[in-house]
Amino acid sequence: MIEALKDDQIVHELGGRFKFTALVQHRIRQLMDGARPLVERQGRSDLEIAVVEVVEGKIRPSQDPDNAEVEDE
């Protein structure tokens, strides 16, 4: 998971580290409130799940800062 973050391409695609962090934080909150993970949990924490979902492009920032777009499978 951390290896994927060493390449700044994902961060730049999202508009910077602040937006990346805000998106991950928002997704963690959704997972803690009972949202279904979009990747297999495999013993990973909510933080790890959120980062993997962002890195894999399963969630993206929306125009509404209070919501994250979740890609339908």
Image: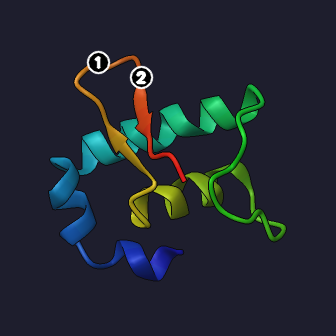
Q: Position of residue 8 (x, y in %)?
A: 22, 70
Q: Nearer the viewer, residue 1 or 57?
A: 57
Q: Position of residue 9 (x, y in %)?
A: 19, 70
Secondary structure of the residue carrying numbered label 2: loop
Q: Nearer the viewer, residue 59 or 3?
A: 59
* Left/right of residue 8 with respect to residue 52 in the rendered view: left
Which residue corresponds to the image point at 27% horizontal and 41% vertical from the top-left?
18
Categorize mark 2 by other alpha carbons within 10 Å: few (<14), some (14-19), many (20+): some
Callout 1, which amino acid?
Asp
Secondary structure of the residue carrying numbered label 1: loop
Q: Nearer the viewer, residue 12 or 53?
A: 53
Relative to 61, say whether 67 is above or below: above
Q: Image quadrant for the C terminus?
A: bottom right
* Left/right of residue 5 with respect to residue 34 in the rendered view: left
Which residue corresponds to the image point at 50% horizontal and 46% vertical from the top-left?
72
- Would you name the residue on which mark 1 appears? 64
Which residue corresponds to the image point at 27% horizontal and 40% vertical from the top-left?
19
Q: Image quadrant for the N terminus?
A: bottom right
Q: Residue furthest front?
A: 73
- Residue 67's disc is 2
Q: Position of residue 42 (x, y in %)?
A: 81, 71
Callout 2, which amino acid?
Asn
Instruction: Give how far apart the Cα atoms at labels 2 and 1 are.
Output: 6 Å
Q: Position of residue 66 (x, y in %)?
A: 39, 17
- Could you tell me if the residues under marks 2 and 1 are in contact, i.e. CB atoms within 8 Å? yes
Could you say which quadrant of the image residue 30 lies in?
top right
Q: Residue furthest bottom?
A: 3
Categorize mark 1 by other alpha carbons within 10 Å: few (<14), some (14-19), many (20+): few
* Left/right of residue 38 with respect to residue 2 in the rendered view: right
